[in-house]
Image (spheres, helix red, strand yellow):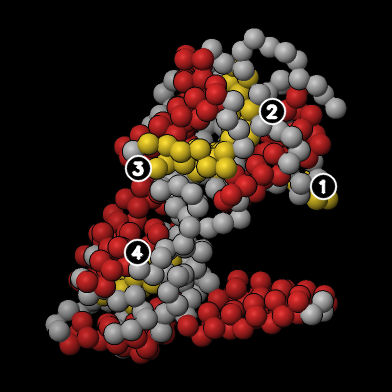
Amino acid sequence: MFKRKVMANKTVGILTAGGDCPGLNAAIRGIGKTAMSQFDMQVVGFYDGFRGLMENRYIRMDSNFLSGILTLGGTILGTSRDKPNKMQIGSKVMDMTEVIVENYYKHHLDCLVCLGGGGTLKNASHLMNQGLNVITLPKTIDNDIAGTDVTFGFDTALGIAVEAIDRLHSTASSHHRIIVVEIMGHNTGWLTLGSGIAGGADVILIPEIPYDIEVVAESILQRNRAGKHFSIIAVAEGAMSKESAQKIQVLKSRKEKAQLDNETELAQKLSTELKAFKAQAVGTTIELAANLEKLTLVESRVTILGYLQRGGIPSAADRLLATRLGSACSNYIKEGKYGIMVAAKGEGVEPVPINEIVGKRKMVPIDHPWILTAKSVGTSLGDKI
């Protein structure tokens, strides 16, 4: 095992992991500039997430490296979804944790900063258990990380989705169609709900509220009877019908009972069945549009925004948030505060222990002000007329 060499100034490692999103470069810049200019730290960037750290692919950052990246989308360091303990090496999946730990000490790191979402939190927690000093920053367009008011990347994606809905209004109204817009969000509906309200969608479907297809169809027919011969439906990719949600709940209950009864084989079988059904139940936007066309006799079209929502230059709000969190991160490193996520709290920041939030997800509460606002302006959420 490598031992830490005593050095005058701290050395910080940075990597970006998981999906890319706007604001990552702003965060890298915020960490690097503060660390180098304020605290005379050394900063090492690892390419392509945990894989780059494992393969020891890195760059020693300086002011020139950080210059001009504030406005760039994506991540200048590259990213991947590789996990330290489950990494594809040739034809095998291997635990490369030991190699990552060795490289951490080879570079005499005092801290590894991981920019990422829920999966990155799990990987960071795993490395913490190996004795490494780790700090994370919350990034994701889904805005679903527990413990923080907001994640960087969300505001930019929200603006992109709203602009798409704005543009689709003209086609929907001109052709008297139902336009179904699929927006990212496998497990949570923050992005769909926010962009649906801001874009004036007539129906918003999110994972937290299973929908009744008959209710959705009736809301469209009510619009038609009122002389409004088009409808915009904003649907999260993880939205599902009440029937699918009920079946998932039944499978979950059966699996939990099998586990309590120590029926391991049955529990594993039900777990596989549950995973397969979940995959089948989500991402059914095209099927949803076809069913609505049958029920309403109104022509429908589907637009799937996909990766468009994750691309492009970050908004001013995301640049500000990412820079603020990045700068605060370097201050926490200077103070020796590790094992934390740098969370946004109001206009300030707060160090949240990683072990308190790992594995948790911030869902949209049913009584959230955005939900109440949507209902107040007559937007259907697919649960009742």
On residue 57, the disc is: 2
Amino acid carrying label 1: it is Met
Secondary structure beneath disc 2? loop
For the point 41% across and 31% down, which residue is it? 323
Tell me which label, 4 or 2, sits earlier in the chain. 2
- Report the Cα–Cα distance between label 2 and label 1: 19 Å
- Residue 225: tell me if it is visible: yes
- Report the Cα–Cα distance between label 2 and label 3: 37 Å
Q: In this view, does 72 lie above or below 279?
A: above
Picture quadrant where residue 286 is located: bottom left
Tell me which label, 4 or 3, sits earlier in the chain. 3
- Report the Cα–Cα distance between label 4 and label 3: 17 Å
On residue 177, the disc is: none
Picture quadrant where residue 135 is located: top right
Q: Name the residue under label 4.
A: 368
Which of label 1 and label 4 is nearer to you? 4
For the point 62% across and 17% down, which residue is it? 10
Q: How packed is label 2: few (under 14 Cα within 10 Å), some, or many (20 or more)?
A: few
Tell me which label, 2 or 1, sits earlier in the chain. 2
Amino acid carrying label 3: it is Gly
Q: Which of these two is toward me, 185 or 346?
A: 346
Q: How packed is label 3: few (under 14 Cα within 10 Å), some, or many (20 or more)?
A: few
- Report the Cα–Cα distance between label 1 and label 3: 41 Å
Q: Is residue 367 above or below residue 132?
A: below
Question: Do the residues bearing badges 4 and 3 touch, measured as CB atoms within 8 Å?
Answer: no
